[in-house]
Image (spheres, rainbow, N blue to C red):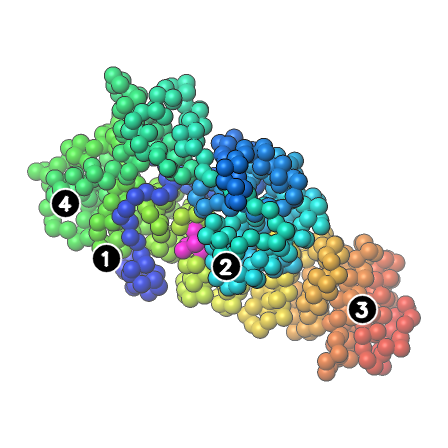
Amino acid sequence: MIDAPETQFPAEEEYDPDEPADLLGLDGPVTATNYGQTATYTRSMNQYINQYYGQIRAAQQLNAGDITLTLEGYVDRVFFRPANPKLAMDTDRAATVVEEHRSVLLVGERGTGVHTAAVALLSRLGRPVHDVPIDDDKQCLLPIDQVGWPSQSAAAYILTVPDGAVSRSVSALESEIATYQRVLITRGDYLVVIIDPRVQQLLGGVHGVNALAVGPPEPRAVLLKELAGQEHRLDVDALAHHQALAETLTDLPPRQVRRLALRIVAAADIVLAQNVNDPVTAIAEQAVQAYRNWNDELEGWFAKVEDARARLFLIALAFLEGEPGSLVLRQAEALGRELKEPPDAYGGIASAGIRQLAATVNARLDERHRVMFDRPAYAASVLGFVHADRSDEFRKHLWFWAVRLPMRRGSVPSVPIAERIADAMFTMAMSVPEPDAPEIYWVIQRWQHVTLRPVVAGLVTAIALSPEAGPRTRRRLNRWASESTDTGVLGMIAIVCAGELADSYPRAAFTRLNNLAARGFDSVESEVVAGVLRLWERPRHRLDVLHRVTDWITAEEPRRSVGLRCLAGLTADPPGARRLLRFLLEQPEQTRTELVAGLSQVFALLPAVPEEIWPAMASWLSAAAEDSSLAPVVGELMFQAVGVNPGASVRASRLVGFVVQWQPMGGDVDPRRRAVRDLMIERICHADPFARGARSPEPVVLR
């Protein structure tokens, strides 16, 4: 039995600092992908969030498998020169233009598949394809020297110009694009710069960069591609040409065509199980109704059914479809109490029971007494309709009730129920225009049990990465990282920012981690440190990690302690230290100099360095003893640590003491350790203004 403990209703500012107008406006046509559920499948979060997130990940991360997945669904489209639209070319011909000029502007509207077109172009050149990161928060391009390039070998890159980039300076944007072009061509790479037609008109072109324009693919061709795997059970061609679907397909962008295809599959699951005479028509009509979120049907149902008990059952089932009817009814009555509905909503012997309620809401019970809707994608449609038709106050009470559903008094929360609630929030948010999900704050806040953390992280990541709700959600995460006082919320933000979010929006992820590092909460600092260590394991983030850690080390508390803890974790043993020092050696001279200057502050802080950092500092010396090529880097760290500011001799004395403590003068059993000790002392003495004459490799005694 699931029973939520009594919890005080959170205050407005605790829930979300947005103004009420920024919460949700959910009426209007559908503009995003979501996944319909069938009447025969007990769903899990993997069915929807993970499937949708997989598509986003394939589009954004572009590893070899993701590119293959993207190209499998690719439909050829028309490319042309903006100055000569009549001169059309296919993808293969357009790819030869890219190969010839090595860099092109690709002009196309957002949402028309222009990024997929860029992937298709570059994949034909036989190079790994990567997206160039941008500054998501400022909506501008990164300075090229701040880009952590994912590949050191020859590659092909896609640079998507944010729409807001032109607002700063047209000439500056043109110069930035030209710089990317020049540097990447010099490296032997290819570059496709995606730009919106409106931005391109303001820009007027970039000197020396050729331009191509691309339109959307033909909607019916996309639909046929999406339904190719259904040909064994569906007359796909007849469906694609059915009048109801043909009218809906008109001018539909690719993402919406894929959404319609999913509605067709969901409708087919229901219709084919009913053995109707004309399945093509039935599937087409139900798919169109589902695509339109069943708005007409729900409007008629609510106009006809005024019984509060039935309405509560409908809403509860939208969250709990596939669960036993007794659970759905019990939680429907709990929702009635939350909304302070009149007592007759809870029912007695004279009230409608589960079967009657199921029939009233267009649902049925299976042989295991689980309740399923008879309409595809009906649950998300119900939630979207109710959200659009009710006040902000109702929405708050609704989600306050919903987030308590997985909680069990005195027991471990129900992960399957939590997955259903997360799925309901996600599918509802993705089925509305200008989708938004401020309610995730409650989910993060209430679901802090360790068993629910993967569910929460998956939900927040999927929404934050979605093209539809992502920008608002990423801004919220940044605000919460700076303003929330709930350490559970802050810890989850650290987990999310160290996950897949960093792969798609690295600058945004590190900005939020930086804000978290300044909060001064021990548990949050631990999550930030753990997140930084996870990011270090992904090579593309290592330069950003070191820049951030060195920034923290040279900052004020509490960021300094976070930076020191991160460095302690990165170099906790000689193998870890070797990896970091070798990475330093691989960097260009200017970058290496900047990083060494920052890292040297660890030694300059002696003896005030926290105890936990001492083993890491010793591991740097041990790594240098095991690999002599690393010794000069550690020696430079020592040299920089002494510095020229007041107190240099004191710092030098402390550093010598530290080195001698690592390898005592009278314990020279390993010549490699003795050589490193002597080299470090020599470098320290060269930096000390009172001991610069000492050049002997033998131990130096400071006077």
**Numbered disc 1: secondary structure:** helix
Amino acid type shown at disc 2: Val
Quarter of image, res 7 = bottom left
Q: CA distance from mark 1 to mark 2?
A: 39 Å
Decide: few, some or many residues near mark 4? Use Cα within 10 Å; few <14, some 14-19, many ≥20.
some
Q: Nearer the viewer, mark 1 or mark 2?
A: 2
Q: Is residue 123 visible?
A: no
First-in-chain label (1 vs 4): 4
User: Which percent across, then down, holds residue 652?
Assistant: 77, 75
Decide: few, some or many residues near mark 3? Use Cα within 10 Å; few <14, some 14-19, many ≥20.
some
Numbered tag placed on residue 660 in the rendering: 3
First-in-chain label (3 vs 2): 2
Name the residue tied to disc 1: 393
Q: CA distance from mark 4 to mark 2?
A: 52 Å
Q: Which residues are magenta?
A: 470-474
Amino acid type shown at disc 3: Val
**Numbered disc 2: secondary structure:** helix
First-in-chain label (3 vs 4): 4
Residue name at image x 22 percent, y 55 percent: 391
Question: In the rendered view, does 541 fall on the left or right side of 627?
Answer: left
In the displayed structure, would residue 243 be above or below residue 700? above
In the displayed structure, would residue 352 be above or below residue 644? above
Quarter of image, res 281 = top left
Residue name at image x 65 percent, y 35 percent: 126
Q: Nearer the viewer, mark 3 or mark 1?
A: 1
